Image: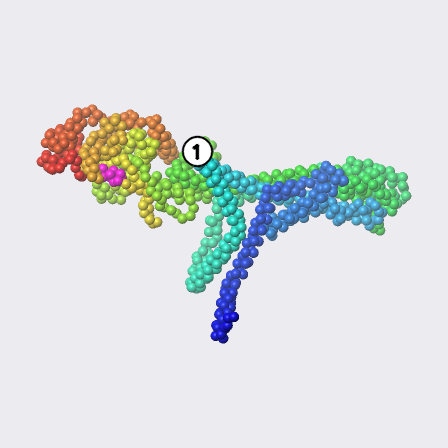
Amino acid sequence: MQTYSAQNINNFRKQISNLFTQKKKIVQLPSQNLSAFSNLKNQKKDYLIQKIKHKMDEILESFYVLILVTTFTIYALFGDDIRVFITDKEKDEIFWILYIISIIIFSTEIILASICQKNYFNSFFFYLDTVATISLLLDIGWVVEYFFDNHSATSTSSSSQLSKAGKASRVGTKAGRIVRIVRLVRLVKLYKHAQQALQIQSQNLKKLEEEQQNIGKNQQIIKLQKPKTQFQAKVHKLILKNRIQKLIKQKKQMEKIDTNFRYIYFQNSYVCKQKNMNYISLKLQSLNTEEIHNKQTIQYKENDNNERNDYISAQSKIGIKLQELTYKRVILLVLSIIMTVPIFSIETYKEEITSYDNSLACIYDFYQKSQIDKTKILFDKYISFHQSTHQCCKKYPINSNEAETDQELEKFRHEDIYYYTFYDNQGILAGFIIIDKTIDSELNAILGIVRTIFVSLILGYAANSFSVDVEKYVLQPISNIMKKLYRISQNPLQAIEIEETETLILEQLKNKKDKSDYKKSQEIQKFETAILENLIIKIGKLLVMSFGETGSNIISKNISKTGDINLFFPGKKFIGVFVQCQIYNFEKIINILQQDVLFFINNIAQIVHTVTDSLSGESNQNLGNSFLLVWKISSKNQLNQSLYELPIYSVIKTLMAIKDSKKIRQHYNKFKLQIYYGLHVGWAIQCTIGSNYKIDALYLGKTVNISKNLAQYNSQYGTQILLSANMYTHLSKECQKMMRIVDRIYLNKYKVNIYTIDLYLYNYYGFDKFDKSHLSSSLIKKSKVLHKIQRKQFKENIQQRKVSSLDIFLKDKNIQKIRLLFIQNPYFYSLWNQAIQLYFQGKWIEAKYFFLQTINFFQEFNYIDYPSLYLYQYISDFNFQPPPKWEGARKL
């Protein structure tokens, strides 16, 4: 047996007390945590309540519930009139039971909607639904008989009961008229359910489309992953089974933890909100409230004088238009209802009979004088007279104290019987008559059905007309804006095309004899939605003009996505022809023209870009003194030689158009304009360079630099066009025959031949195609649209090899005109080929004599061959002896 000392026992007691204190510390929570915990409990309760409300809302908006409520709403509108017109009194109870069921259904709907739907309780529709539901009580016969019981008078001869029956019949008739008016309120309920049904139908269609898209995607995935062998098929099935089982397990787990997850989400959101509120409150306390108050008072004083004008100017034109249309339609609706009131009133078809009471007074006088025979004759005449208007009962009382019961009265409904009573001078009931008003009730039922249908049509027309106005002036313009945004997001270059086509359509409408369509379009153009639509197109056009086709990828991705703007995407590598256009002595031109240089450069840019665009090229960089032009070559068209020849054709057409331009030609007396081109084929990277402050869409690569260097080398050789050897090899043999090798130089440590095409532009003057001062604005807009159409068609024909660019080149009379001097002198090229080959071989003394011949070959035409002159000067600087280690190429 183990023994413990007193010290051990004390130590053991201390350990136990420490444990208890630690436990207390763990259990005790700060007051803030307790309050947060209680708040979280409340939030969990709120979440459960919201979940229940959401479930109730789903039940109310379900398809079957809507059908049920709509069916009983239609019954509530037409049921009572059908009961009166078609059935007998024996079957009335079936209709009354259906009305009770309707009240239960509508009341349940109102209670559930008040609980689960926001802004429904105490709203306009809440009161309309309540009134419509309460009005159903007046269609239940048991309720009406309880308040307006007129059958009890037939069983007794009490004058007081007959008096009550007479009054009750009058009150019941008036109540029936009120019920028919109140019943029209139920149409609103029917319209509301129709709207809900349409919304659910549209949602179901969207779900079906999404499911079909998902099914299509899954089918594509299955087709891509289709196994080839039996073994692969078995493995594929096993993998699919495992995936399906995992998905089922994950779904069950997610369903279990769904409530817990949302509860945790509420916890985190509550804590974050509490922290943010504390931070905001501290910040607000640190502000100087006096300064804020002073600023606000100053703003109020400044805006007080212009408050009314601002309010008037703030009214939108669309709002004013919709307001006018709403006023017109409301007035027309009210007038149409007022004008049709007599049509649906029974007084229009039957005159009101007032002889019942007066005739009873005459009969009573005869009865008092004990002239029973005459009284009976008068009663017979009384009945026969009113047979044409109403069917009187077969039996009638002779003495008010000896009234007989009529079993046939039990067959009539309470609304089909009307009591007329007569009192003597002492206020005692002297006589009464019971009128059969079945014909009137049936006529009222028919008029009630027609009235309900008419009001339904009127309300339907009103709702449709209002929705058409909203569709025309608000929804349709917004839809057009979204469509245009989508088109621009898919292809930003269409922004220019959209604007040009719309302006062309407006011009065509303007030129028509019938100006109605043009006036309507001009009226629509004044609305804010049209202004916004045009603004989006202009913004898209400016973006395209700023970024070009290079930046179209940036525009499309940022328009099609939401969130932060992302201007930087991975570069895209492609092969293309790069053309650098450079203006020689640009600084000198600036010093001469100064501020007018803007118009001068823009005129050149207009010609360069227009010709490039018409021949399937695109413009990239505009640096004032130079322009970068690009022809992209897809992988499918890399062997299509026509695509490589288009840039050459474009360059020559541009040089000719600049020579023809009157606006540019007027400055020739101030300076000599020289424009140089460099062409090269290769790969480059399409990308964006810059930061969040400024970006540029550029092409990066050696190809761009080579074309730029070639453009600069023109000033040395005296040429206007220089091509690289890579560009030369991609041309057809017929096009290569037009080229002349100029030199062999080192580019990036490689020997590269450079070529040119000879043009004689000095005496060439053609028609200025870019002078549109004599054209109207409509013709200018039309020409732009036609230009886009022709460009698109030309590009398709070139890519499909239906048209050859060389054939177009050779058939162009103006190009043949500036090439005629060199075509007619083939001997010049034979001399040049001998000279250049001797130059490459290092035999410069022999080459000197051939260069001298080519320099002055066209002397009679005042034309000097500058490439020959340049190479002659180069070899003369070395005393016509090649430098040591000459390899047939030189560095520039």
Residue at coordinates 60% horizontally, 51% vertically from top-left? 114
Task: Report the residue that reaches farthest toward the front.
Answer: 1
Amino acid under disc 1: Lys
Q: Secondary structure at mark 1?
A: loop
Say whether residue 484 is left or right of residue 728.
right
Relative depth, front residue between 146 and 689: 689
* Identity of the residue drawn at 67% across and 47% down: 104
Residue 558 visible, this orientation:
yes
Mark 1 is surrounded, within 10 Å at the Cα level, by few (under 14), some (14 to 19) or many (20 or more) other residues, namely few
Q: Position of residue 414 (x, y in %)?
A: 76, 43
Please tell me how many numbered marks the rendered image carries: 1
Magenta region: which residues? 702-710
Q: Is residue 854 visible?
A: no
89 with respect to 212 (left or right): right
Left or right? Give the position of 223 relative to 603: right
How was the colour assigned to the protein in this rendering? rainbow
Q: Position of residue 625 (x, y in %)?
A: 25, 41
Tell me the residue at 83%/45% (across/down): 155
Q: Quadrant of residue 680?
A: top left
The kind of secondary structure the magenta stretch mainly shows is helix
Q: Position of residue 346 (x, y in %)?
A: 71, 39
Q: Position of residue 879 (x, y in %)?
A: 9, 36
Quadrant where the image shows the C terminus: top left
Task: Name the residue furthest left.
Answer: 879
Q: Quadrant of residue 815?
A: top left
Q: Is 374 or 89 nearer to us in this picture? A: 89
User: Which residue in the protein does label 1 denote?
Assistant: 228
Q: Is 480 a magenta residue? A: no
Q: Is residue 775 left or right of residue 389?
A: left
